[in-house]
Amino acid sequence: MQFRTIIKILGQLVALFSITMVPPALVSLIYKDGGGVPFVLAFIFSVVIGMMAYYPNRHENGDLKAREGFLIVVLFWLVLGAFASLPLIFLQEPNLSLADAVFEAFSGLTTTGATVLTGIEYLPKSVLFYRQQLQWFGGMGIIVLAVAILPMLGVGGMQLYRAEIPGPVKDSKMTPRIADTAKHLWYIYVSLTLTCMLAYWAAGMSWFDAICHAFSTVAIGGFSTYDASIGHFDSPVINFICVFFLIIAAINFSLHYAAVSSRNVRVYLRDPEFKVFLCIQLALVVICFTVLSSNEIYANGDETLDQALFQAVSMSTTAGFATDNFSTWPLFLPILLIFSSFIGGCAGSTGGGMKVVRVFLLYLQGVRELNRLVHPRAIYSIKLGRKALPDKVVEAVWGFFSAYALVFIIIMLALMGTGMDNITAFSATAACLNNLGPGLGDVASHYGAITDGAKWLLTIAMVFGRLEIFTLLVLFTPTFWRG
């Protein structure tokens, strides 16, 4: 294991990450909100620690194999999450405990969107900007992870994309092609963010709100600058813009890249995962609209459609934005939408959950087993589009699903052990493991009222969900450290 090379890389990452403390400090200067000092302190602290890790190891250039890749990916999220919490710890107002600051930072960086804060609109603008910015950088990290790195490491069936997307390589070494892939993804991500920001501004948001909400929309994060989330603006146009960009951000970014480079939108229509994703969204919207209409929750059909469309897409893509308190809807709908977050967005998107392609493959495998019961001697292959998949990919997906279920059960039981009721424990685990954000019961509006122990458990759940379970789980196996 190339430990010194790994320490050098982490030192570089921390020093680079310190730059993210500068924009909130500038926002504090512009708005004179008095919240800039914690960001300056965090900047200095991060630069010093980063250089202390980097400088003694600056000449280390060992070849990084898949094992080192797993360790770097996990440490990337854990270390940056810890440093991201520094300005929140240094803040005088609000005065957050260590558990609260770490929870909020990890929620931002993993794009979960669960918050311990209330009275958000009264916080310093610098703090508001920082929370949104964390989600934006986290979203970019997720895309690079999902499109460039995880397929190479072969995590949970994602090797499916090795042959199809630009960047991931066939051997087990980290190569410059990952950097090349990351660069192209950055262009697409930044372009989407700028377009979303301009759309929000044109629809009536202030520049500050437009920038902040574009950050969290494209990252499918869910943080807002208001307690009432998107509902604060009370605008069907803003709701629709949010839905539109959430759907785009929940599509595999390698598809966006293929469409841009080939200048052909038919790329999307040829992708089975994309078609399944759209069908799921449509079905959820129809169900929500039908149930809300039959219960006469809203005054007219237009408002019902607006609310059904927004909440269905926001929850199923794991954004967690709100226009209304959906926990007051007929219980069938909140439970349905929380279950939809287990599917989440497409692979290689900023969405959370198990990903559409994995759930679709599980369905195809189920159909194959039923067919085998009828015709035991027949040979059935699982096809994604026109491509027959090797059994090892399907096995990896089954392994991922079982690991996901196991982690979910352990965390939910641990939460109940802290004294949490069953509905809150179930929804909080789902919300954090799927990187969704809002739950039911005591965590319907915020997570400030739960115990510190529960917050630490849910922080772990966020990291598990973001790292696609296996990436973190593999570090707990003796084989990993022996190999």
Image: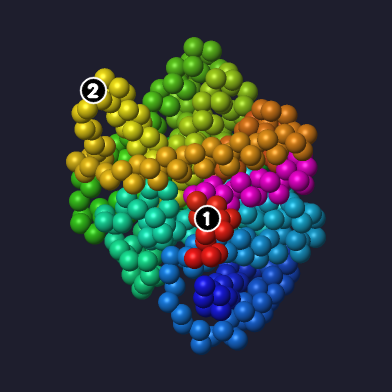
Taking depth in this image into account, of 164 and 92 the one nearest to the observer is: 164
How many dots with numbers?
2
| Position in image of residue 223 (x %, y %) | 59, 47
Q: Quadrant of residue 302?
A: top left
In front here: 56 or 157?
Answer: 157
Reading the image, the residue beneath label 2 is 375
Observer-nearest residue: 46 or 152? 152
| Residue 2 seen in this snapshot | yes
Residue at the image point whose x is 21% and y is 33% from the top? 379
- Quadrant in which residue 476 is drawn: bottom right
Does 57 appear in magenta? no
Check disc 1 and report the residue beneath it: 474
What is the span of residues highlighted in magenta in the rendered image? 449-469
Q: Residue at x 26, y 40 (%)?
A: 384
How crowded pointer 1 is (Cα within 10 Å; few <14, some 14-19, many 20+) is rated as some
Residue at the far top in the pictured view: 294
Residue 253 x, y percent position in the rendering: 36, 53
